[in-house]
Amino acid sequence: MKIDFSEIGLKVGLELHQQLNTKYKLFCDCSPILRSDEADYVFMRRLRPTQSELGQIDPAALFEFKRGRKIVYEGYKDTTCLVEADSGLIN
């Protein structure tokens, strides 16, 4: 059976997370070095499900929101900028 994906309206997205060996980060001029020293600050994000352009809520985002999932990030004054830390600082 051959499926016409345009006919059924299939839309697929892919999100990748990979540390790249580049001079700068993708969306800013910060250095992409890996750090093991103590962070200058820590900030937290909570996943908040919102409607997509199609008016739908991602079921995975909703599931994690209901679980109260919090994501804690460590930041450094010389390698982390507002592009990455776009939420309020907690420390």
Image: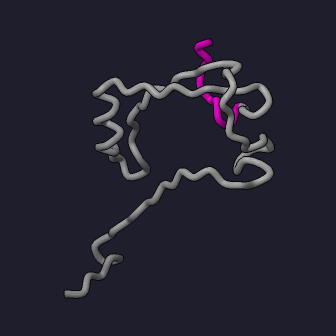
Q: In which quarter of the image is the N terminus?
A: bottom left
Image spot of residue 2 (x, y percent): 24, 87
Residue 89 part of the magenta-drawn span: yes
Residue shown at 62% from the left, 12% from the top: 91
Image spot of residue 20 (x, y percent): 66, 54
| Among the 4 quarters of the image, the one containing residue 77 | top right
Residue lying at the far bottom in this picture: please name it: 1
Q: In this view, does 77 lie above or below 8?
A: above
Nearer to me, 80 or 21: 21
Q: In this view, does 26 lie to the left or right of 57?
A: right
Residue lying at the far left in this picture: please name it: 1
Q: In this view, does 1 lie to the left or right of 28?
A: left
Residue shown at 61% from the left, 26% from the top: 74
Dominant SS type (magenta): loop
Give, as a single range, the part of the protein colored magenta: 82-91
Q: Is residue 4 above or below residue 9?
A: below
